[in-house]
Image (tube, rainbow, N blue to C red):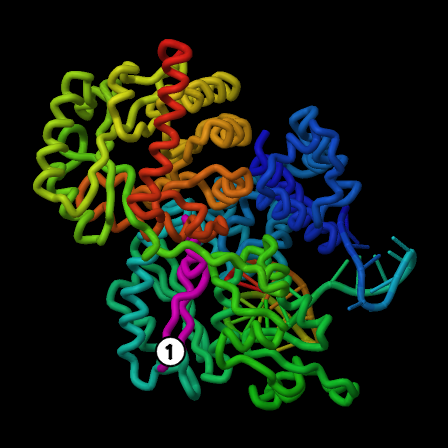
DNA sequence: GCCGTTTTCGGCCCGACTGTTTTCAGTCG
């Protein structure tokens, strides 16, 4: 059981407790515990097996620790079992509908027996929902619409899809009269691999109504969900929702911080602010008045923004995001790190990592050509790499098991090497490594014979078949491949395809330990459909000293441009340039390869070939 | 249920918007 599974169980428990009406603080405690487990680099399972104390993890106390130990031993959370004897677990899915929270879910269940989205749809059709207390005709319509949206698109959007929309909308907003700074915020700015909705913050001095009106006239918008003086929401035909916030210049930095999140990061910042005698919200950082002079209710309707802000005390920051962090005694924290995984403490102590940048990348170590399933020749790919300023590259066409895409047999591999040499002669300014993406077969053997592997400059291996092996078999399979003396890089290690295919089940921790021992690098696949390894896995690789390579897996020249998505994900995993192998100069990279080559030959000679 | 620069008890982040309320609860980010 992975950390992700434990977090999911804790979250489900929190959802159901919330519907039951449990203390909101208790619910939050379970959510915090879930977040703590989710962002933990080490497997909780290993900690339990090693007899370590889970309460050492911030957010996990005696009670949750006991629950987790039981979950690992029996496969279920005892508390979750208790709760599901009282209410059906499917109720938690109701709250995934926009506009339906725990309270409405509870009323629907207790009044109408609605337990699933299908039930709810029937109740709506029968006109039973609008008469419930706290509901109404308008609410019923909204819920019906929410079901439609849910059915149309239940997953999240991939980063490149959301980014394309966001950039068009941002450009459109910049055309509006009187608009100042326009920034994309939210999880897109944090460069998460999937995006729920797009947030855009816009600077405008005065009542924002005309900006919002311009926004909701965006030509591609399918629906307008909301339109006020500071906020608007539109939905695109794909189901992607775009939220706009319009704020005055003196609040722009605070609003950008606030709408960038993550929620966990922002909450931690606000707690910090309170301890410093400050108040942080989307309008700025305010010094809390020491005298309790303001006894009036700041919620009193009719207050002008100026008067309301006066009640919060003098503004000490808000115009620029850097200023918000400075006011809290912190250096500015890059958005990619804002997950409350230690970045605030690191900022306080001046030990934020110098994150790897796209400009640091000196080569791309996985791409395909027309020799297998690529769309461009070796020379076209090489010229495209030259255009991107790279010093080296690897042509990694598939091996023979991938027959459907023309994977290379030993004979065709040798033919291909001749073409690599010819292109190399024509293009002396880039070093082209002779390589292959060699399939890891079902039993962990490699798909090309040792005599072929030995003549490759670089051996990249990956799994493309039998994804549903059980955990033990899959772990043994990958371990065997990683321990093969010819192997240099383990590519797209978990095999996930975002929104399409789950990662296959294996012991990531054990494989990373093996990579560390063997000096094998793991690939961070930059294709936005994969982004495999995840930020947490990459972070763990760094901790264990496993080198990471960021490769695009390009199948045509334009695919090389995905490198930036991989770099962003590496940054989310706290990687510096030193942690990423393909930031090295050609000379330094070849030094790494040579060291591995010597080791490889030594083992071959001693054992007379690989096992 | 967690946790400690105010604490082993008593707190726990903050504001906007919506719809259904006649003064506010629910939801969201």
Q: Mark 1 = which residue?
A: A181
Q: Quadrant of residue A223?
A: bottom left
**Residue A158 visible, this angle:** no
**Quadrant for the C terminus of chain A in the image:** top left
Image height check: is A164 above or below A464?
below
Q: Give the total of numbered labels.
A: 1
For the question of whether residue A301 can be seen, the reply is yes
Where, quadrant-wise, is the N terminus of chain A in this rendering? top right
Name the secondary structure under disc 1.
loop
Q: Chain under label 1?
A: A
Of all residues shown, which one is farthest toward the top?
Answer: A608
Q: At 52% across and 69% down in the image, what residue appears?
A: A332
Horizontal arrangement in the rendering, residue A594 relative to residue A263 (left or right):
left
The part of the image, by quadrant, that contains residue A133 is bottom right
Q: Is residue A73 magenta?
A: no
Q: Position of residue A547 (x, y in %)?
A: 44, 39
Q: Magenta stretch containing residue A186, yes or no?
A: yes
At horizontal 46% and vertical 27% (from top left) the residue drawn is A518
Frontmost residue, A294 versus A146: A294
Report the magenta residues as a range.
Answer: A180-202
In the depicted structure, whether residue B10 falls above or below residue A597? below
Rendered location of residue A329, percent (x, y) = 63, 72
- Residue beneath the point at 64% across and 62% down: A268
- In this orientation, which residue lies closer to the viewer: A83 or A610? A610
Q: Nearer the viewer, residue A113 or A195?
A: A195
Residue A188 in the image: above or below residue A204:
above
Residue A587: horizontal and vertical position, in percent?
A: 30, 44
In the rendering, at what x and y percent does residue A548 appear?
A: 42, 41
Q: Is residue A419 above or below residue A106?
A: above
């Amino acid at each position: 059981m992975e950390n992700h599974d434990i977090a999911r169980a804790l979250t489900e428990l929190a959802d159901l407790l919330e519907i039951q009406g449990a203390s909101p603080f208790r619910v939050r405690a379970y959510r915090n515990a879930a977040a703590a487990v989710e962002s933990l680099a080490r497997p909780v399972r290993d900690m339990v097996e090693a007899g370590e104390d889970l309460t050492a993890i911030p957010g996990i106390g005696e009670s949750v620790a006991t629950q987790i130990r039981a979950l690992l031993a029996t496969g279920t959370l005892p508390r979750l079992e208790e709760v599901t004897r009282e209410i059906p677990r499917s109720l938690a899915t109701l709250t995934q509908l926009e506009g339906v929270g725990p309270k409405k879910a509870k009323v629907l269940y207790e009044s109408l027996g609605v337990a699933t989205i299908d039930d709810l749809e029937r109740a709506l059709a029968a006109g039973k929902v609008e008469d419930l207390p706290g509901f109404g005709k308008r609410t019923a319509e909204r819920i019906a619409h929410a079901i439609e949206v849910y059915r149309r698109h239940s997953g999240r959007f991939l980063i490149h899809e959301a980014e394309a929309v966001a950039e068009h909308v941002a450009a459109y907003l910049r055309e509006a009269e009187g608009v100042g700074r326009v920034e994309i915020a939210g999880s897109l700015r944090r460069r998460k691999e999937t995006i729920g909705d797009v947030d855009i913050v816009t600077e405008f001095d005065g009542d924002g109504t005309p900006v919002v009106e311009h926004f909701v006239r965006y030509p591609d918008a399918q629906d307008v969900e909301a339109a006020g003086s500071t906020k608007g929401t539109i939905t695109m035909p794909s189901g992607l929702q775009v939220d706009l916030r319009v704020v005055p210049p003196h609040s722009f930095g605070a609003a950008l911080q606030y709408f960038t999140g993550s929620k966990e990061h922002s909450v931690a910042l606000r707690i910090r602010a309170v301890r410093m005698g400050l108040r942080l919200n989307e309008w700025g950082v305010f010094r809390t008045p020491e005298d309790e002079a303001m006894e009036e209710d700041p919620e009193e309707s009719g207050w002008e923004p100026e008067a309301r802000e006066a009640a919060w005390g003098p503004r000490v920051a808000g115009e620029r995001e850097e200023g918000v962090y400075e006011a809290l005694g912190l250096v500015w924290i890059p958005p990619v790190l804002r997950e409350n995984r230690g970045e605030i403490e690191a900022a306080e102590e001046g030990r934020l990592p110098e994150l790897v940048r796209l400009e640091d990348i000196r080569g791309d170590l996985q791409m395909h050509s027309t020799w297998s399933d690529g769309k461009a020749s070796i020379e076209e790919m090489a010229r495209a790499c030259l255009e991107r300023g790279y010093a080296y590259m690897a042509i990694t066409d598939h091996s023979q098991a991938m027959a459907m895409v023309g994977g290379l047999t030993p004979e065709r591999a040798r033919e291909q090497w001749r073409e690599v040499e010819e292109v190399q002669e024509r293009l002396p300014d880039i070093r082209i490594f002779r390589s292959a993406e060699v399939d890891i077969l079902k039993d962990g053997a490699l798909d090309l014979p040792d005599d072929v592997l030995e003549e490759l400059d670089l051996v990249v291996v990956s799994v493309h078949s039998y994804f549903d092996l059980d955990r033990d078999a899959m772990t043994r399979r990958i371990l065997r491949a990683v321990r093969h003396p010819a192997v240099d890089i383990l590519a797209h290690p978990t095999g996930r395809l975002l929104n399409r295919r789950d990662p296959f089940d294996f012991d990531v921790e054990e494989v990373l330990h093996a990579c560390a021992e063997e000096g094998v690098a793991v690939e961070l696949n930059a294709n936005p459909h994969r982004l495999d390894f995840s930020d947490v896995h990459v972070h763990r690789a760094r901790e264990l000293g496993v080198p990471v390579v960021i490769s695009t897996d390009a199948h045509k020249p334009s695919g090389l441009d995905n490198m930036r998505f991989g770099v962003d994900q590496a940054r989310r995993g706290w990687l510096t340039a030193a942690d990423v192998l393909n930031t090295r100069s050609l000379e330094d990279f070849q030094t790494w390869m040579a060291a591995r080559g010597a080791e490889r030959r030594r083992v071959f000679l001693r054992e007379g070939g690989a096992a």
